[in-house]
Image: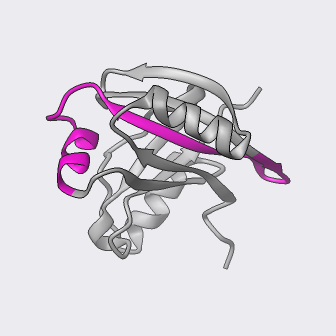
Amino acid sequence: MDSVFQRIDHVGIACHNLEEKIEFYESTFGLVVVSREVNEEQGVREAMLHVADGDGGASYIQLLEPLHPDTAVGKYLSKRGEGVHHIGYGVADVAKAMADIAAKGVRLIDERPRHGSMGASIAFLHPKDVGGVLTELVETPRH
């Protein structure tokens, strides 16, 4: 059986102050910000920091600061504090991956792919069906 996942695309980390966390990751680990975005739909201000390149593509740390306390990341922070929010896995075709995974009984949070960081198509799987881990499928844009 072929794996649906091609690589770990990113680890999403919820934080209270994006600028402070960027400074920490840059000064402590030598990571470099490659993208900053405000995603109104998801209610976050985010930064992608490059970790490494591999055969399947690059991997990142995604820092997420909520735009408002009532967003998904804002609620996560108030309940659990700062830390790992989700894991994003690279897939070749997000719509096909969604269909294949749903056919195995895993609930999808998203009914169809949506816009993600750096132009990716993304979709989330329900954490209760994935061992308590919020899981994101990421199809990076083809250049």
The answer to whether residue 64 is magenta is: yes
- What residue range appears in magenta? 52-79
Name which quarter of the figure residue 6 lies in.
bottom right
Q: Residue 89, how many percent across, how many down?
A: 57, 55
Does 34 sit above or below residue 123?
above
Q: Residue at x 38, y 41 (%)?
A: 15
As rendered, which of 25 and 45 lies closer to the eye? 25
Residue at far left of view: 70
Residue 55 lies, in percent from the top left, at 85, 54
In the image, residue 73 lies at what x, y percent? 28, 42
> Can you name the residue that lies furthest to the bottom here?
1
Q: Which quadrant holds residue 106?
A: bottom left
In the rendered view of the protein, which quadrant contains the C terminus? top right
- For the residue pair 92 and 132, the one nearer the viewer reads as 132
Residue furthest out toward the right? 55
Residue 56 picture location, percent across and down: 78, 52
Q: Who's the residue at 57% across and 26% down the image?
A: 119
- Name the colouring of the figure: one colour
On the rendered image, what quadrant is the N terminus found in? bottom right
Is residue 125 toward the left or the right of residue 91 in the image? left
